[in-house]
Image: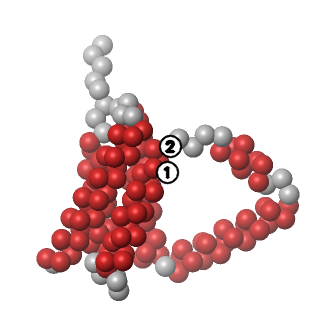
Amino acid sequence: MAQFKQSPWGAVFLLLGAYTAFGKFLTETADPPTSFWIAAVWALVLAVFFVHPLTNIGRFLNGRFESDAVAFTTLVGLAAMASILLNWFKLFLPVFMLLACEALARIDLQSARYGEKLSTVIMTVTAWIGLASGWMLGQVI
């Protein structure tokens, strides 16, 4: 049976499209230059976050919820975040789109056996190119 090497480039192009749409969205904000700098740093942080696997998360969560007070405080905090999210849905929808595309690109790059450093560089450069494309698109349209 022939084995085909998985290609992550479909997910990387999807990530590029998502960041292009997000860059276009940022041109419509009150302060586009500051928004773009924040988005560029955000793209780097997301790439680093998604490249490093989340290990021992079960142990981390179990250690945090040992007391009822911590669990209650966490639930109240999550309810507050959900209300903010629903109030500012127009802002959070593109952010969720970016998170999903970053996760998909990370999974595809990992499946194709790219290293952590190379995956971080690919995801960050793709995000920055997408933001620049979205900015140029926002200036033209």
Q: Is residue 110 above or below residue 123?
A: above
Q: Which mark is residue 52?
A: 2
Residue type for callout 1: Phe
Q: Nearer the viewer, residue 37 or 6?
A: 37
Secondary-structure class at tag 1: helix
Q: Position of residue 81 (x, y in %)?
A: 61, 72
Left or right of 83 in this view: 14: left
Q: Nearer the viewer, residue 40 or 95?
A: 40
Residue for badge 1: 49
- Image position, residue 115 (x, y; %): 39, 34
Name which residue lies at 43% across and 75% down: 91
The picture quadrant where one finds residue 17 is bottom left
Q: Amino acid at mark 2?
A: His
Q: Position of residue 4 (x, y in %)?
A: 28, 24
In the image, farthest residue toward the left: 140
Q: Decide if residue 15 is in sight here.
A: no
Q: How is the image coloured?
A: secondary structure
Q: In the displayed structure, does residue 48 sit left or right of residue 131?
A: right
Task: Report the residue at 42% width, 63% height from top.
Answer: 42
Marks 1/2 in contact by CB < 8 Å: the verdict is: yes
User: For this view, does 136 lie left or right of residue 47?
Assistant: left
Q: Kindly identify the residue that appears in the image at 38 percent across and 53 percent down.
A: 101
Q: Which mark is residue 9?
A: none
Mark 2: which secondary structure? loop
Mark 1, residues whose alpha carbon is within 10 Å: few (<14), some, or many (≥20)?
some
Toward the bottom, the furthest residue is 30
Give the quarter of the figure containing the N terminus.
Answer: top left
- Quadrant of the frame with the C terminus: bottom left
Q: How many marks?
A: 2
